Each structure stands twice: as structure tokens, then as C-alpha cells.
Amino acid sequence: MVRDDRPFPIQGGAYPDPIRPPYYPACTIPWWLAEEAYKVYSAKYGTQQSLERLAERGGFGREELVWLLRGASGHEREKEVRNARRKEVRKHDV
């Protein structure tokens, strides 16, 4: 099996957070990796935008790519854990 190594764009941008570096440049990943991320993307959002169209529009954002490669369920679980911890902290603050 031959992997598709065409470049897929990853958006650059700026973080509003003063702790992080203020800017990160745009870059690319291999197309085959974008296809893996697109599996999660299309399951969550549908296939109205093809992977090709996403590439034309600038690709995925960096954090979006990480979220997609981890899988949406992993991200949702992390969010649940964070919310549960916040509730515990609030309970002890009262």
C-alpha cells in the first residue's frame, strides 16, 4: 500500500494567551495523515466539505488536528474529567 504524501495545509495563527508563543506559522502534514483526521471530522460534522475542499480553504487548525487525531471521544472524555474536577474544587470552596 502506497501512502499519499502530498502536502495538506495546517493553518498558522496567533494565540491570545500570553503564556504561549504569540504566533505559529502555517505548515503541512502528509495527506494520508489528514485522511485519518478527516475520518473523525466527517463522522462529527458530515461530508459536506470534502478533504480536498478543506485543503483549498486552508486545512485544519493545529489544535483541531490534534483533537481530530485523538478522536472526538477522547476529547469529550477529557472535558468531562475537567468539569468534574471543577465541581469538586467549587464544592470545597463553599
Image: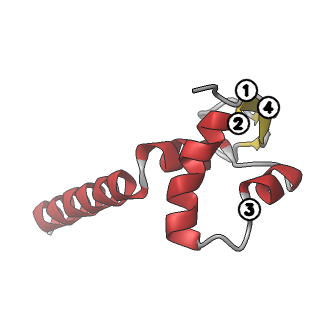
- Left or right for 11, reference 66: right
Q: Are marks 2 and 1 in contact (CB under 8 Å)?
A: yes
Query: Of marks 2 and 3, which one's residue comes earlier in the chain?
Result: 2
Q: Residue under label 1, please give it.
A: 5
- Identity, as a three-letter code, of the amino acid under mark 1: Asp
Image position of 33 with respect to 43: above or below: above
Camera-side residue of 67 and 89: 67
Query: Of marks 2 and 4, which one's residue comes earlier in the chain?
Result: 4
Q: Residues within 10 Å of mark 2 (few under 14, many from 20)?
A: some
Q: Are marks 4 and 1 in contact (CB under 8 Å)?
A: yes
Residue 31 is marked as 2
For the N terminus, the image quarter is top right
Per the model, the C-alpha gap separating discs 2 and 1 is 5 Å
The kind of secondary structure element at disc 4 is strand
- Identity, as a three-letter code, of the amino acid under mark 2: Trp
- Identity, as a three-letter code, of the amino acid under mark 4: Pro
Colouring convention used in this rendered image of the protein: secondary structure
Q: Residues within 10 Å of mark 4 (few under 14, many from 20)?
A: some
